[in-house]
Image: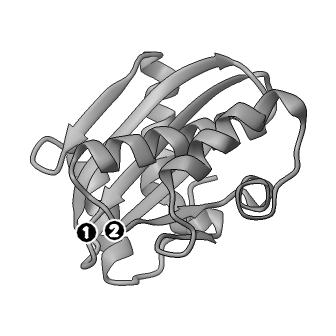
Amino acid sequence: MYLYAINIPRDILLHVYSGIIRDSSGQCIRAFFSFYGNCTILEAELRAILDGIILAQRLGLSVLWVESDSTLAIHCITKGGGPWHIQATIRHIRHLLALDRDTITHIYREGNQVADLLASEGWDRRCYHEYSSQDLPRRHRSLVQIDRFGLPTVRGL
């Protein structure tokens, strides 16, 4: 199971978070996005991770591999630290994750293209939305397959 989390845009204080939950073969189980509003980038990253974990557990998935392109968010979760206003979120994540069983790792932004596309959609729609594997839009499904097979892609300019 993979959870990809990313937020956009990084240059203003309004944030969107998104993620995709995959099975061990890379197939999409569920994808989500939400407009989070006014917060820091780190808050949005942590919220995406937390909401992805909650969604995965709601779907009955028990062993998780969480991937994020935020090394700072990963560090805060695994090593501790960070500003006081994110500590409750970090505690909640740690409570839900068993770090001796679950894995949390860094993924480069290029490996997060499906979540990036979902975040763009969330920015436009400014709401919470989930897709099942059957109703994921065609462009999103194409990126899932490209990721799944490890094919290179060119990021749009």
Nearest to the observer: residue 113 or residue 46: 46
Residue at point 40% right, 65% down?
Answer: 64
| Figure check: 22 above or below 20 | below
Q: Residue furthest bottom?
A: 150
In the rendered image of this protein, does residue 100 appear above or below residue 92? below
Q: Is residue 21 left or right of residue 85?
A: left
Asked whether the residues under the numbered discs 2 and 1 touch, taking CB atoms below 8 Å apart as contact, a structural biologist would say yes
**Front in this rendered view, residue 17 or 61:** 61
Q: Residue at x 25, y 69 (%)?
A: 23
* Disc 2 packing (10 Å; few <14; some 14–19; many ≥20): many
Picture residue at 42% right of the left edge, 18% below the top = 125
What residue does disc 2 label?
1
Q: Position of residue 130 (x, y in %)?
A: 28, 33
- Dot 1 lies on which element? loop
Q: Secondary structure at mark 2?
A: loop
Residue 129 position in % (x across, y down): 32, 27
Say which label, 2 or 1, has the lower sequence index.
Answer: 2
Rendered image quadrant of residue 132 = top left
In this view of the protein, can residue 10 be seen by the observer?
yes
Q: Is residue 61 left or right of residue 98?
A: left
Which amino acid type corresponds to the residue marked 1 in the rendered image?
A: Asp
Residue annotated with mark 1: 23
Return the mark for residue 36: none
